[in-house]
Every structure is written in structure tokens, then in C-alpha cells.
Image (tube, helix red, strand yellow):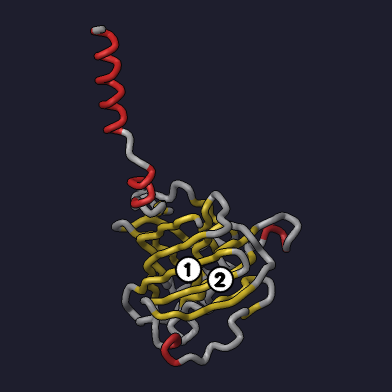
Amino acid sequence: MRCTCLFRSLLIALLLYIPSSTAAADDSGWNSLFNGRDLTGWKQRNGTAVYKVEDGTIVGTTTQGSPNSFLCTERDYGNFELEFDVKLDTQLNSGVQIRSLSTPEYQNGRVHGYQAEISTDGNAGFVYDEARRGWLSKDRNNAQAKAAFKDGQWNHYRVICQGDSIKTWVNGVPVADLTDSMTKSGFIGLQVHSVGGDPHWQVRWRNLRLKEL
């Protein structure tokens, strides 16, 4: 009898400790892509831009003569919601790759695929097909979308890829809403664009998190 009571007590304790399915769902399923300390989980592809961690942010710096550089997640993602904050030097163009690829048979491993544009020229948040087809967001004339990105400030991006749908928001403003079926899954990549000369321009990312759908 004593053993039975002890077993029941232990079982009740375990049931109270183990979170319910509702509690797990309340966690929302978000996963951080960046630990705030180092570049664990990331791999640089193409180019010689310098990526390092400073004060809890990923900092990408241009280098002379480098082609486009990309710091890419080591794993691929298909259907997901992605959020991040970004700030860049005014003169620099950048982007975040989504569902992107790098294979030996495609231009010697050149990174290619969907990109959420990061720039101060009114194109921020629109979708570009890096090293493939160019702009997928053909109409980029919406005044509110063009004004969403704030020069010299931290800007918040939200990207949802689900099935053939790709949608983006910049600082809460809807920007891109397109349908494309070319690539179903791929890595996330942080671009430092090629530049002329050696200006050491920088782009910074923080609060990178992703929820698989």
C-alpha cells in the first residue's frame, strides 16, 4: 500500500510539472536564429564581406572587390514567419534571402533565390529574385510602402512564406504580396552587397526569429 501511494504521489507530481499542449501552443513556436553572442548556426557563402557580432547584433561590413556576400542559416526552411530588425548605412543596399539556395551546378555555388530588399531608395520590403529573375515585385509605386523604411533607424521586418504565397511588412506597413512557385524551401541569408572602392559601409541585424508554419 505504501509503495502504491508513493507511486501515485510521484505520478501526480510529474503531471503537474509537464506542460500541457495548451501551454506549449502559448509559446507561439518562435525560435531565435541568432543567439546574440556568436555566429553559431550560420555559414558565410560567396564574397569576402566581414560578419561579426557586436553588442548583440550581427554586423556586416563591405570589403573592397567583394561580390555580394551572404551569411546563411545552416538549415533550410519552407513555410514560416520571419521577423527581424535591421539598420544600414544610407548608401548601402542589402537584403535578407528567404528560401534561397547555393548549389555547385548553379553558377558555381552562387547564392540565388527570393530576397526581401533592404534599402533607403523606396524599394525596401519588395521581393527581388537574387541571381535569377530580378524583381518579382513588379509594381513598387505604393507611396505608403515606399515610405515605410526609415533611414538611419532600426526597421522591423515581417515575412510570411506559406505555399506559393510570399508577403512582407516593413514597420507594420504591408509591402509585398506575391505568388510564386519556383522555390519551396531554402535557407535564410543576410546580404552585404558589393560596392565600389573600400567604404566599409555596414548593415546590422538583431532580433532574428522564425516560426515554422
Q: State yes or no: discs 1 and 2 in contact (Cβ < 8 Å).
A: yes
Residue sticking out furthest to the right: 105
Residue neighbourhood size for the residue with mark 1, other residues' Cα within 10 Å, grouped as few (<14), some (14–19), many (≥20) = many
Q: Residue at x 38, y 50 (%)?
A: 25
Q: Which residue is mark 1?
A: 159
Residue neighbourhood size for the residue with mark 2, other residues' Cα within 10 Å, grouped as few (<14), some (14–19), many (≥20) = many
Q: Residue at x 53, y 75 (%)?
A: 195
Along the viewing direction, whichever of 140 and 203 lies nearer the viewer = 140
Along the viewing direction, whichever of 5 and 102 lies nearer the viewer = 5
Q: Residue at x 26, y 26 (%)?
A: 13
Q: Position of residue 29 (x, y in %)?
A: 41, 52
- The amino acid type of the residue labelled 1 equals Val
Q: Is residue 48 left or right of residue 103?
A: left
Q: Is residue 142 left or right of residue 163?
A: left
Q: Which residue is mark 2?
A: 166
**Could you give the CA–CA distance between mark 1 and mark 2, rounded to whole angstroms?**
7 Å
Q: If the image is split into quadrants, where does the N terminus sit?
A: top left
Q: Position of residue 170 (x, y in %)?
A: 41, 76
Q: For residue 45, which quarter of the picture?
A: bottom right
Q: Is residue 193 left or right of residue 149?
A: right
Q: Is residue 159 above or below residue 13?
A: below
Q: Position of residue 183 (x, y in %)?
A: 66, 63
- The amino acid type of the residue labelled 2 equals Ile
How many numbered discs sit on the rendered protein?
2
Q: Is residue 150 above or below residue 206?
A: below
Q: Is residue 86 above or below residue 126?
A: above
